[in-house]
Image: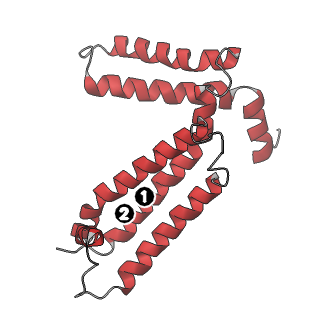
Amino acid sequence: MVNYTFNQLAIYFQNYGVMDFLLPFVLVFTIVFAVMQKTKILGDKKNFNVIIALVLALIFVVPHITGTYPLGYDPVQVMNESLPSISLVAVASIMLLLLMGIFGANFAAGAIPFIALLAILFVAYIFGSALNLWRGPQDVFYWWTSQTTELLIIILVFGLIVYFITKEPNTTAGKGMLEGLGKLFERK
């Protein structure tokens, strides 16, 4: 019996195309098939939905394997660069909602649109970074890395936790623009 370590297993997956072909193919196929099944664009024709999902997933990964995508615009590379950071944003958002749920159900329900908007902005930034959209002639965001994004999310989560633990129950959240944000997070 061969004993593989996780490092050797990861190298094996990388060498045999699991990371470049199989995983992106399965992900795209699953998402397209699920959307086709849910929206029922073609009715309840499961076989048509499978064929469309299969074709779109193959169109997504085959040019990556053959190297025909333009440099910097390979969607498999963009996906492989973006998904770890997007997963971090998803986990941070869910953890934030869980921690906010400790303070009460009404409180967490009111914060969901704010957290969703923040998550959408992070996801847009992450995909833009993977596509090098934020790099201009001056390269303004040269200092912004995935570690910076992770640090800001952690600081935001802990800042919100500290704020909600230490705030006085009878005080207002602030004046002007911050007052509306404070009302969003109030218990009802």
Instruction: Specify the farthest residue to the front.
Output: 138
The reply to whether discs 2 and 1 touch (Cβ–Cβ < 8 Å) is: yes
Residue wearing tag 2: 97
Residue 89: x percent and y percent? 49, 53
* Up-down relation of residue 160 to residue 152 (above or below): below
Q: Amino acid at mark 1?
A: Ser
Q: Amino acid at mark 2?
A: Leu
Residue 161: x percent and y percent? 42, 75
Q: Residues within 10 Å of mark 1 (few under 14, many from 20)?
A: some
Q: Quadrant of the N terminus?
A: top right
Q: Quadrant of residue 99?
A: bottom left
Q: Which mark is residue 25?
A: none
Residue 179 in the figure: left or right of residue 134: left
Q: Residue at 67% across / 55% down in the picture?
A: 143
Residue wearing tag 1: 93
Does any portion of residue 4 appear in the rendered image?
no
Pick the front one: 37 or 60:
60
Residue 177 in the figure: left or right of residue 129: left
Total number of numbered discs in the rendering: 2
Residue 171 in the figure: left or right of residue 87: left
Q: Quadrant of residue 21?
A: top right
Residue 119: x percent and y percent? 42, 52
